[in-house]
Amino acid sequence: MGPAPEHLMNLTVKDLILPNGSDWNRALIKQILPHEEATILSIKPRKSGAPDKMVWLGTSSGVYTTKSGYLKAMEDGNVQTQTPTAIGIDWNNNVWKLQVPPKIKLFLWKIFQGALPVGDRLASRNILVDTVCKSYSNVESINHLFLHCDVAYKVWNLAPFSTCIDSRGLIDLTTAWKGLYKLVCLPPSGIASGPLAPWILWSLWLARNNRIFNNKESTPEKIITKAVTAAQEWLREQTPEPSDSDAAWRSDSQRAGLGWTVIENELNSDYMAHCLYVPSPLVAEALALREAMAHCRAQGILQLHCQMDSQQLVKTLISKSPNPEIYGVVSDILLLASSFLSISYEWFPRSKNKVADALAKQALYNVCLVSPNLDNGV
């Protein structure tokens, strides 16, 4: 790219925004930063006079945490550590993104970091303990406890997977993990949307501790039953957060369809619009609400009850603490809200919000079908 020309040396973000502050100056962006146009336009600036806000880019909330600071320092310092990542653990996909509770994720992290206090790990730290497995006359290691012990072998055999697992044929848990957590359970098990393998490791660990500290034995049948039951109960309590209601979004084109319906004096009026350069479903939801509120205000409606199926957006509006991604749009919404005599926000199940959802999808379909190369929008 080279050095900036002299007349652009002191350019700031505000210089790329139109004088009225309503939107980006696309002509100027095309002239001086054409390669960054799409990225800049995907940031939705406020239309009102919301104040600037300092945010920490290391977290989605924009709030600094010690953990995020540590990770950033490690990243910038290019610090190399001896971890199991070097032999195949993809921490993000193989551990942190698994559909299991945080305690199980931390437990997996300890396993693959070699931080679980099994016999051989305690002995390596000069802690005087009996290192022999209580169920099998071998040194208790992570691989032995979870794969090669007679109890573990029987538990894996009893697991309701669609394919049989011979855990004794697996040399190392770390290298075998990518295959284990992807194992699919048979339909009657009731575990279709999440992995069972992490729960098996957790149940084996609980059984081991119960045997050592409480002198209580657990049969392989009881261990696998507890693993399956715990997985079923946790998955059953998870309610997926809706991502669109009055907004429909396409990731490939970053376009969004916006739809809203207004009920006034028992009469329904339906509206839709579209928007380009929308980076996420949450931004689309916020844009749709802003358009709907602005429309109602222009129509002279002074009392408003907003229903949407994005729990995250509702929580943000109630707490008035938007994350950086929607800071500008939510600032506009809150300013608009102050012009109503009364306003409230309510989460609405998607199943009860079908009209607005259909309008949004129709708006998205129309803009993609009629103008596939459209270069302007809301």
Image (spheres, grey):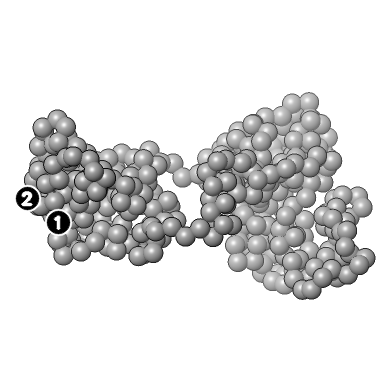
Q: Residues within 10 Å of mark 1 (few under 14, many from 20)?
A: many
Q: Amino acid at mark 1?
A: His
Give the mark toward the camera: 1 or 2. Answer: 2
Side of 237 relative to 157 (left or right): right
Q: CA separation, marks 1 and 2?
A: 11 Å
Q: Is label 2 in a helix, a strand or a loop?
A: loop
Name the residue nearer the viewer: 176 or 84. Answer: 84
Q: Which residue is mark 2?
A: 137
Is residue 267 shown left or right of residue 59? right
Q: Residue at x 67, y 61 (%)?
A: 255
Question: How far across and how far down the image is residue 85, in percent?
Answer: 39, 61
Q: Identify whether 299 is placed above or below 166.
A: above
Amino acid type at mark 2: Ser
Would you say 142 lies left or right of 364 here?
left
Residue 34 in view in this figure: yes
Q: Image quarter for residue 214?
A: top left
Which label number is shown at residue 148?
A: 1
Name the residue furthest front. Answer: 126
At 66% across and 40% down in the image, what residue appears?
322
Q: Is residue 287 left or right of residue 144?
A: right
Q: Earlier in the sequence, mark 1 or mark 2?
A: 2
Give the numbered dot on residue 106.
none
**Camera-side residue of 28 and 9:** 9
How far across and down, in percent of the image, does residue 15 sit?
A: 88, 56
Spot occupied by residue 319 in the image (x, y as percentages of width and height): 64, 31
Which residue is at 55% across, 41% downward? Answer: 66
Rendered residue at 27%/40% (across/down): 230
Q: Secondary structure at mark 1?
A: helix
